[in-house]
Image (cartoon, rainbow, N blue to C red):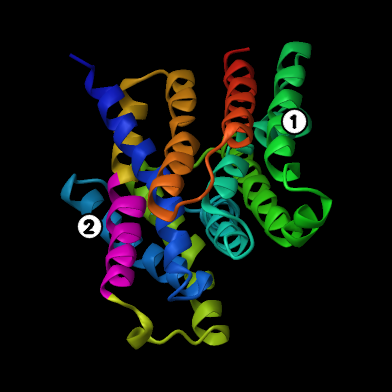
Amino acid sequence: MLPLGLIVLSIASVGWGLNFPIMKHLLTEWPPLSSRGLCGIVGAAALALIALARQETLRVPRGMWLRLWLVSTLSLGGWVAFMGLALLWLSASEAAVLGISIPVWVAFLAWPILGERLSLLRAISLTVSLAGIAVLLGGNGFDASVEKLPGILCALAGAVCTALGTVLTKHFPLAMPPLSLAAWQVGLGCLPIAIVGLAVEQPQLAALSSIGWASMIYMTVIQFCLCYVCWFAALERLPAATASIGTLLVPVVGVLAAAAMLNEPLGAREVAALVITLGGVAVALRA
């Protein structure tokens, strides 16, 4: 029987992976900033209630507000906003594969910020993972890649923001209970995105179909609540390296789910890009 840590890690990874095709479909009914921002705010409120139910304090220690806001804006806000915008140009599977690049940028940024030296094996592994991404995005020819360039830049910006936020969290530790910290990070990260989305995109509730509402509920309850609860439960029970490698299941689920739910292509090129990228990141995480 699988240990509980692996079970909750699998739930989080599958839940986050399924979110790529669900979000891609939702964009046919609602704009990206409003949908992701509003779902994040509701999800943050639910996480706060869960934290209180577990008797975790929501109080932010004095002197931590600035670093909490900075990390939340980068880690959550940057990812939520840029990845939502990226899906306007990219397929769900392409966005999922680009999301794997987060450990790459973490390793590169940790060198100057944290002084963590980049070993030769890890540098080679990360380069291989970037090559896998290049295989996926360059397979349809130069013109197709240029058309997708805004989406590629947005997805990479989201990955870099998340990586920078991760490194800064390690550099400036946030001494708070995990669920309370997640509630604050999701809320602070998504609030400005929701405000900008409502002001600029002006979404209409009448535009949402039953599937659209189901997608919004999924992103709120599963992506922002259940997955985070399971993720922190996994971190309590598993070594950090094991948990990090386990999240590589996210893009695999994203690519397979996009093929099944959205009929996106799943050929030799997509499989090769996924395998190369996953292999490079996995070796880098273990190096």
Q: Is residue 30 visible?
A: yes
Magenta stretch bounds: 210-226
Is 143 covered by the magenta stretch? no
What residue is rendered at 68% in x and 32% in y? 104
Residue 199 on image: x %, y %: 54, 86
Dominant SS of magenta comes to helix
User: Which quarter of the rendered picture does the N terminus lie within?
Assistant: top left
What residue is rendered at 58% in x and 49% in y? 95
Relative to 239, residue 211 above or below: below
Toward the viewer: 142 or 175?
Answer: 142
What residue is rendered at 45% in x and 31% in y? 247
| Label at residue 49 | 2
**Which secondary structure lies at badge 1?**
helix
Residue 93 on image: x %, y %: 54, 46
- What crowding class fits label 1: few (fewer than 14 Cα within 10 Å), some (14-19), or many (20 or more)? some
**Amino acid carrying mark 1 in the image:** Ala
Toward the viewer: 31 or 196?
Answer: 31
Instruction: Between label 1 and label 2, give the one nearer the viewer.
Output: 1
- What crowding class fits label 2: few (fewer than 14 Cα within 10 Å), some (14-19), or many (20 or more)? some
**Amino acid carrying mark 2 in the image:** Leu
Toward the viewer: 86 or 242?
Answer: 86
Mark earlier in primary sequence (1, 2) = 2
Toward the viewer: 13 or 24?
Answer: 24
What residue is rendered at 40% in x and 63% in y? 40
**Which secondary structure lies at badge 2?**
helix
Q: In the rendered image, which residue does mark 1 sit on?
A: 131
Q: In this image, 143 relative to 191: left or right?
A: right
Q: Is residue 117 visible?
A: no
Q: In this image, 270 relative to 31: left or right?
A: right
Pointer 1 with pointer 2, Cβ within 8 A? no
Relative to 69, residue 167 above or below: above
